[in-house]
C-alpha cells in the first residue's frame, strides 16, 4: 500500500471528489438542463443551426469531449500533488 | 509483462497503422478504377467484404496467444490513443453506423436523444469508474464485484446481468451483420448471418482481447473513412465546403422550406413533438429518460468497461476514455448531417415525383425485402409523402447512391458497416465468453484449472455463444436500435449502482449490493418483458427502451437501505477501497481473497 498518512489520503480524496462533483454537475447541465429549453433555444440561430437542435446534435458533445480531457489532466495534477501518481 | 516483440510493435504503432490506412485507401482507388473499367458491382461488393475480413483474420492470427493476460487484457500494453480507436470501433456498432442516421432521419430532434445518450456516458466512465477499475486491474467486471462484495453471489449476479445485456446486444449486431452481408453478397439473410459469424470468430478466437484490440483499431480506420467519405463528398458538391458537420445547417433550412411548402406537420428540428407536430409531454419525458438510460448504460456495459483494463496504467486509462470519446464523437457529430442530407434529397427528388420515374436508388432498394415500400394509395401516379415508407436501417447504406457516387463507394460503406458490426460483436462476444470462462468456470467451478484449460474453455464458450446469438438473430426479434437500447437499460439497472457505490461509498455492504442488483435489474427486466410481450401498460408513458428509469432508483434505494441495515464492511475491505482510490502502490488485498 502507498505510504500515505490518513490525513493526506483524506485530503487527496477530498480534492478528487470535488473535481468529480464539478464535472458531474457540468455533465448534468449539458445532458439535461440545456435541452429542457430546446424549444425556446430553437428560435435562436447559431452557425446557421437552430440553437436547441445544435446543442443536442453538436454543442453538448463538444463539451463532453472537453470534460473528459480536462478530467484526465486535472486529476493527474491532483495525484502528483499528493505524490500518488504512478511513475 | 510485454515481450520484446510486443514492445517493438507498440512503439511502431503509428507507422504500422499509418501504412495500413494508406494501403486501404489505395485498395479503394484500385477498385474504383476497376469499376470504371466495367468490373461488375457484385465482384466489387465481394472484394470489399472478403478482403477486409481477410485483413482482420490476418491480424487475428498474428495476435494469437497462449498467455492469459494477453488473452484477457491484451497484455496491458495498449496506448491511450489506440485504445481510444479500438474502443470507438467496439462502441460503434451496426446501430451507430447503419441505423442511427436513419433514426435521426425519421425522428428529427427526437433522435438526438441517441446522439446525446451514446456520447455523454463517457464522462461518467471517466470520472466514476475507469481509473478505479484499472487500479483494481483484474480481468473482468464481475471480478471486481466478486472481490469488493466478498463472494460468489455478487460475482454470479454480475455475470447474469452481463450475460443478459451483452447477449441482447450481440443478437442485434448479428442482425446488422446479416443485413449488410446479405445485401452486398446477394445471399439470403439467414445464411449471411453465419457468414458474418465466421468473420467474428476469426478475429477473436486465437488471440482473445489482444486480437480484438488490434483488429478493432484496423476496423475503426475503415469505418471512419467509410462514414465520412459520402457526406464530405455530398457537402462539397452541394455547398462547396467539405465539412458536412457545418454545412448541414443549410440543408436543415432547405428541409424547413419543403416542410412549409408541402404542409408537413412534424418538423425535423422541432423538439419534443409528436407525429402531428404538436408539443407533447410524453415525447419530452421519453427524451430525457432515454438520454439518462443510455448514458448510465454506457458506464455499466462490461464490454466497454473492460477496455480500460488493457491500458498500461491508471493515468493512461483516464486519457484513454477521453480519446475513446473523441473518436466516437467524429462519427456521432456527423450522423445528423447524414439525416439532413438524405431528407433534403428525398424531399427534393423523390416526393412529388412520378412513381414510374423515381431515382435508381429508390428502385434498387425497393427490391430488398422490407427496406423501402412504395404504394400508390390514391392511384394518381405521383408519390406522396405518406406513400413512401423507408426503413431507417438503409439511410446510410443508400447514401452513396443518393449522392450519385460510383458503386465503389457503396462497397466502401458496406465495408465500414461490416467493420462496425464485427468490431462490436467481437467485443461483446469476448466479454460474455470471458465472464463465463473466467468468473464462472475458473473462479467458481475449477480454481485449479491450468492456463491451457482456461484458454480452451474460453474459446469453446466463444464459439457456442456466437452460434446461439446468430441463430436467435435469424428470427429477427426486434429492430436493431431497440435491442441495443434494451441492453443498455439492463446493464444500467443491474451494474451501475454496485460498481459506483462500491468505489465511492465504503459503507456499501455485500448484502446491500446484491439486494440492489437483484431489485434494480428485476424491476427493469419486468418492465421490459411486460411491455414487450405481455401488452403491459406503459408507466407514465415511458417507452421500454428506457426501462432502467425505473430500475435505477430502485437499485440505489435498496442498496443504500440494505447496506445501512447490515454490518459495515471490515477495516480490511475499507483499506482495499482506499487502495483502489490511489493510483500509486499495490492493492490492499483482504486476507483470504484469491486473485491472479
Image: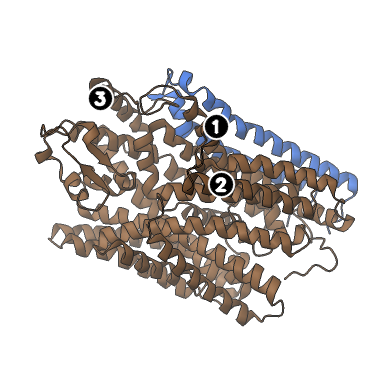
Chain colours: A blue, B brown
Distance between mark 1 and mark 2 Cα atoms = 17 Å
Kindly identify which numbered label has been placed on residue B367.
none
User: Could you say where residue A57 lies in the image, as x and y percent from the top left?
Assistant: 45, 34
User: Could you say where residue B316 lies in the image, as x and y percent from the top left?
Assistant: 63, 54
Find disc 2 in the rendering and name its residue: B489
- Disc 2: which chain? B
Q: Earlier in the sequence, mark 2 or mark 3?
A: 3
Q: Earlier in the sequence, mark 1 or mark 3?
A: 3
User: Closer to the camera: disc 1 or disc 3?
Assistant: 1
Say left or right for A75 vs B242.
right
- Mark 1, secondary structure of its residue: helix
Same chain shared by disc 2 and disc 3:
yes
Q: Is residue B195 above or below residue B337?
A: below
10 Å neighbourhood of mark 1: few (<14), some, or many (≥20)?
few
Q: Viewer-proximal residue, A58 or B233? A: A58
- Which quadrant does the C terminus of chain B fall into? bottom right
- Which quadrant does the N terminus of chain B fall into? bottom right
- Mark 2, secondary structure of its residue: helix
Question: CB of mark 1 within 8 Å of CB of mark 2?
Answer: no
Distance between mark 1 and mark 3 Cα atoms = 35 Å
Say left or right for B242 vs B554.
left
Residue B176: quarter of image: bottom left
Distance between mark 2 and mark 3 Cα atoms = 37 Å
10 Å neighbourhood of mark 2: few (<14), some, or many (≥20)?
many
Find disc 1 in the rendering and name its residue: B540
Which residue is drawn at the image coordinates 25% and 58% (left, top)?
B29
User: Closer to the camera: disc 1 or disc 2?
Assistant: 1
User: Could you say where residue B463 lies in the image, as x and y percent from the top left?
Assistant: 48, 72
Q: Viewer-proximal residue, B13 or B564? A: B564
Residue B437: quarter of image: bottom right
Residue B143 in view (yes/no)? no
Kindly identify which numbered label has been placed on residue B258.
3
Amino acid at each position: 500500500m502507498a505510504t500515505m498518512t490518513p490525513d493526506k489520503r483524506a485530503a487527496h480524496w477530498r480534492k478528487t471528489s470535488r473535481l468529480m462533483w464539478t464535472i458531474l454537475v457540468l455533465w448534468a447541465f449539458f445532458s439535461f438542463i440545456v435541452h429542457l429549453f430546446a424549444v425556446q433555444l430553437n428560435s435562436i440561430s447559431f452557425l446557421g443551426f437552430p440553437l436547441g437542435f445544435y446543442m443536442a446534435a453538436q454543442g453538448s458533445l463538444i463539451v463532453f469531449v472537453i470534460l473528459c480531457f480536462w478530467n484526465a489532466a486535472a486529476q493527474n495534477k491532483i495525484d502528483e500533488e499528493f505524490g500518488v501518481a504512478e511513475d | 509483462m510485454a515481450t520484446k516483440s510486443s514492445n517493438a510493435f507498440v512503439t511502431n504503432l503509428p507507422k504500422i497503422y499509418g501504412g495500413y490506412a494508406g494501403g486501404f485507401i489505395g485498395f479503394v482507388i484500385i477498385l474504383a478504377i476497376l469499376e470504371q473499367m466495367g468490373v461488375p458491382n457484385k465482384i466489387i461488393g465481394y472484394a470489399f467484404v472478403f478482403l477486409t475480413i481477410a485483413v482482420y483474420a490476418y491480424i487475428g492470427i498474428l495476435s494469437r496467444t497462449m498467455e492469459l493476460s494477453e488473452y484477457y487484457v491484451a497484455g496491458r500494453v495498449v496506448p491511450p490513443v489506440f485504445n481510444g480507436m479500438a474502443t470507438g470501433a467496439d462502441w460503434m456498432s451496426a446501430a451507430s453506423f447503419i441505423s442511427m442516421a436513419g433514426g435521426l432521419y425519421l425522428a428529427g430532434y427526437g433522435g438526438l436523444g441517441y446522439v446525446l445518450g451514446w456520447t455523454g456516458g463517457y464522462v461518467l466512465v471517466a470520472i466514476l469508474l475507469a481509473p478505479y477499475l484499472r487500479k483494481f486491474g483484474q480481468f473482468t467486471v464481475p471480478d471486481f464485484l466478486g472481490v469488493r462484495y466478498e463472494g460468489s453471489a455478487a460475482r454470479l449476479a454480475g455475470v447474469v446481468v452481463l450475460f443478459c445485456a451483452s447477449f441482447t446486444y450481440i443478437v442485434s449486431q448479428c442482425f446488422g451483420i446479416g443485413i449488410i452481408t446479405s445485401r452486398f453478397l446477394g445471399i439470403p439473410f439467414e445464411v449471411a448471418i453465419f457468414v458474418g459469424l465466421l468473420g467474428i470468430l476469426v478475429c477473436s478466437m486465437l488471440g482473445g482481447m489482444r486480437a480484438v484490440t488490434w483488429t478493432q483499431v484496423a476496423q475503426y480506420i475503415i469505418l471512419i473513412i467509410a462514414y465520412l467519405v459520402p457526406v464530405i463528398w455530398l457537402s462539397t458538391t452541394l455547398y462547396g465546403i467539405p465539412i458536412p458537420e457545418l454545412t448541414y445547417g443549410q440543408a436543415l433550412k432547405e428541409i424547413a422550406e419543403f416542410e412549409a411548402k408541402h404542409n408537413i406537420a412534424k418538423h425535423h428540428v422541432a423538439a419534443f413533438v409528436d407525429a402531428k407536430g404538436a408539443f407533447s409531454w410524453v415525447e419530452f419525458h421519453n427524451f430525457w429518460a432515454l438520454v439518462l438510460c443510455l448514458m448510465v448504460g454506457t458506464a455499466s456495459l462490461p464490454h466497454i468497461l473492460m477496455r480500460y483494463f488493457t491500458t498500461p496504467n491508471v493515468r493512461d486509462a483516464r486519457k484513454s476514455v477521453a480519446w475513446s470519446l473523441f473518436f466516437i464523437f467524429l462519427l456521432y457529430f456527423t450522423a445528423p448531417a447524414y439525416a439532413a442530407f438524405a431528407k433534403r434529397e428525398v424531399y427534393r427528388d423523390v416526393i412529388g415525383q412520378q412513381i414510374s420515374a423515381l431515382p435508381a436508388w429508390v428502385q434498387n432498394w425497393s427490391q430488398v425485402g422490407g427496406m423501402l415500400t412504395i404504394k400508390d394509395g390514391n392511384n394518381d401516379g405521383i408519390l406522396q409523402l405518406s406513400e413512401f415508407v423507408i426503413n431507417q436501417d438503409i439511410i446510410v447504406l443508400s447514401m452513396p447512391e443518393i449522392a450519385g457516387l460510383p458503386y465503389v463507394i457503396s462497397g466502401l460503406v458496406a465495408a465500414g458497416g461490416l467493420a462496425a458490426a464485427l468490431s462490436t460483436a467481437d467485443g461483446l462476444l469476448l466479454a460474455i465468453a470471458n465472464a463465463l470462462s473466467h468468473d464462472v468456470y475458473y473462479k467458481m467451478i475449477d480454481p485449479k484449472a491450468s492456463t491451457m484449460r482456461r484458454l480452451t474453455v474460453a474459446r469453446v464458450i466463444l464459439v457456442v455463444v456466437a452460434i446461439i446469438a446468430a441463430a436467435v438473430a435469424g428470427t429477427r426479434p426486434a429492430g436493431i436500435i431497440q435491442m441495443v437500447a434494451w441492453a443498455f437499460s439492463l446493464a444500467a439497472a443491474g451494474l451501475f449502482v454496485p460498481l459506483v457505490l462500491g468505489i465511492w461509498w465504503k459503507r456499501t455492504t455485500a448484502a446491500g449490493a446484491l439486494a440492489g442488483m437483484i431489485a434494480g435489474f428485476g424491476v427493469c427486466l419486468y418492465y421490459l418483458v411486460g411491455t414487450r410481450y405481455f401488452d403491459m401498460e406503459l408507466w407514465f408513458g415511458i417507452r421500454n427502451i428506457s426501462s432502467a428509469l425505473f430500475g435505477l432508483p430502485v437499485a440505489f434505494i435498496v442498496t443504500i437501505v440494505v447496506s445501512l441495515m447490515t454490518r459495515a464492511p471490515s477495516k480490511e475491505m475499507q483499506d482495499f477501497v482506499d487502495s483502489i482510490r490511489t493510483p500509486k502502490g499495490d492493492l490492499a488485498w483482504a486476507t483470504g481473497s484469491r486473485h491472479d
